[in-house]
Amino acid sequence: MPSTLMTHPFVQTPGWLHWDPNPSKPRFVVPAGAVDAHCHVFGPGAVFPFAPERKYTPCDASKAQLFALRDHLGFSRNIVVQATCHGTDNSAMVDALQHSGGMARGVATVPRSISDAELLRLHAAGVRGVRFNFVKRLVDFTPKDALMEIAARIAALGWHVVIYFEAQDLPELWEFFTALPTTVVVDHMGRPDVRKPLDGPEFSLFVQFMREHPNVWSKVGCPERLTVSGPAALQGERNAYRDVVAFARRIVETFPDRVLWGTDWPHPNLKDHMPDDGLLVDFIPHIAVTAELQHQLLVDNPMRLYWPEAER
Ligand code: 0GY
């Protein structure tokens, strides 16, 4: 039964696409111990209500459904990123971490007023980062001095900052981003416009940002969000989202020890198509073309960032 049919007081945003309940089995076999480093849980709304200030109301996407997808795709671990529809109430994300048997860690959204005790509680649950979101359709503006204060406090816990922004906003945000005192992880390569040239000014600025700042990492998933050509694969092939490949491959090959990959399940705010998660996994060998790059992307890098204490 689609989870949207469950009883809760929330009305899903019109046009919202439900995640694919029957993703295909990927052909690409991910290396043992692979980490899905960007995914979310939504509610369920009847248990974990969505935030009053949210910009969209999603369908439900529970921890059990996330862990079932993890197993189906062949992954071992998840990084559960706080979604904006839950605001600064991290309960659903923390609940997922606490029921993962130690196989999930998290990225929270916290207010400036958060207490030290609450930060420690989040740490004990497995949170290792905070997310600062600059995508205007998703969040209201938070003053940069508040964010910088949060960054200084979480730096003391050894956490990192995840930043989400649109490519055209990088110049204006550059000074703030480069002053952050932690490892900084960029969501979805800073959302490049893939109709523009790979070596054009916009994407070159992003490459420069990573090159000049060795504390900056990037997630290289989410082709379904960036594509213009769409999911159509060549007959009988599984090479969808071809217009995104060169961008992601450039980042993987230039910064192989600072890249992460995630499904982005349950894929919030997609209006045109809902991806087949199996097809998303089959995108990986197109952007990380050797076994060594694949291992760095899916195992070594996320383990170093999220489970540094694990024996290597
Ligand atoms: C993503 C992207 C989006 C949404 C969120 O937290 C969120 O609501 O991250 C988006 O709409 O681009 O990474 O999930």
Image (cartoon, rainbow, N blue to C red):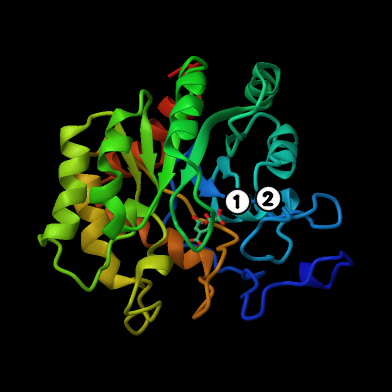
Q: Is mark 1 within 8 Å of ligand 1?
A: yes
Residue 162 rendering spot, x and y as whole percentages: 44, 39
Q: Residues within 10 Å of mark 2 (few under 14, many from 20)?
A: many
Question: Which residue is pictured at 59% across the width and 36% down the height?
Answer: 106
Q: Are marks 2 and 1 in contact (CB under 8 Å)?
A: yes
| Relative depth, front residue between 250 and 192 | 192
- Displayed quadrant of residue 174: top left
Residue 79 rendering spot, x and y as whole percentages: 55, 40
Furthest residue in direction right, as rendered: 7
Q: Residues within 10 Å of mark 1 (few under 14, many from 20)?
A: many
The C terminus sits in image quarter: top left
The residue singled out by tag 2 in the image is 86
Is residue 258 in view from this perspective?
no
User: Dot 2 lies on which element?
Assistant: helix
Q: Is residue 40 left or right of residue 234?
A: right
The N terminus sits in image quarter: bottom right
Question: Which residue is pictured at 28% across the width and 71% down the height?
Answer: 242
The residue singled out by tag 1 in the image is 83
Q: Is residue 281 left or right of residue 176?
A: right
Question: Which residue is pictured at 66% across the width and 79% down the height?
Answer: 14
Residue type, mark 1 in image: Ala
Residue type, mark 2 in image: His
